[in-house]
Image: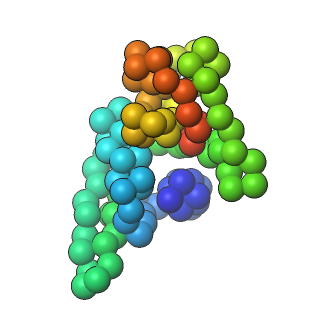
Amino acid sequence: MLTRIRNANTAKHDTVDVPASKMKLAIANILLDEGYIAKYDLVEDGAFKTIHITLKSGLKRISKPGLRVYANTEDIPKVLGGLGTAIISTNKGVVTDKEARKLGVGGEVLCFVW
């Protein structure tokens, strides 16, 4: 999902379609709440579900399949000195870096968004 969004931004596309999953919907909700995407729609096409995302800003993938990046509560990164947002997968769900600090949990750092 993150690579598709990044590629669509690079190619100057307005929208991108991504196959749906619970994790991707949670990330899309965070991106929408923080104002990094304009909107998203869940489209059901027979047995398949697709997320149709309208783009707005850039992102950087941090944790990759070949190298997972984890951070505990004290080491949660700040993006651009607090101007951006880090999306973190914790045992409390997928949350932003600010929420993770407030909850006092760490987890896998998925991406940075600015």
Determine if residue 17 is in view.
no
Say if 18 sits above or below 77 in the image: below
Please tell me in which quadrant of the rendered image residue 53 appears.
bottom left
Considering every residue shown, the one lying at the far bottom of the view is: 46
Q: Position of residue 44 (x, y in %)?
A: 24, 75
Left or right: 62, with 110 as reference point: right
Q: Position of residue 16 (x, y in %)?
A: 42, 64
Front-lying residue, 91 or 22:
91
Left or right: 48, with 4 as reference point: left
Front-lying residue, 86 or 75:
75
Q: Residue at x 75, y 48 (%)?
A: 67
Q: Residue at x 63, y 28 (%)?
A: 71
Q: Position of residue 35 (x, y in %)?
A: 34, 35
Say if 107 sits above or below 18 in the image: above
Please tell me in which quadrant of the rendered image residue 2 appears.
bottom right
Please tell me in which quadrant of the rendered image residue 72 appears.
top right
Q: Residue at x 68, y 38 (%)?
A: 69
Rendered image coloring scheme: rainbow
Say if 78 sits above or below 61 in the image: above
Say if 13 sits above or below 19 in the image: above
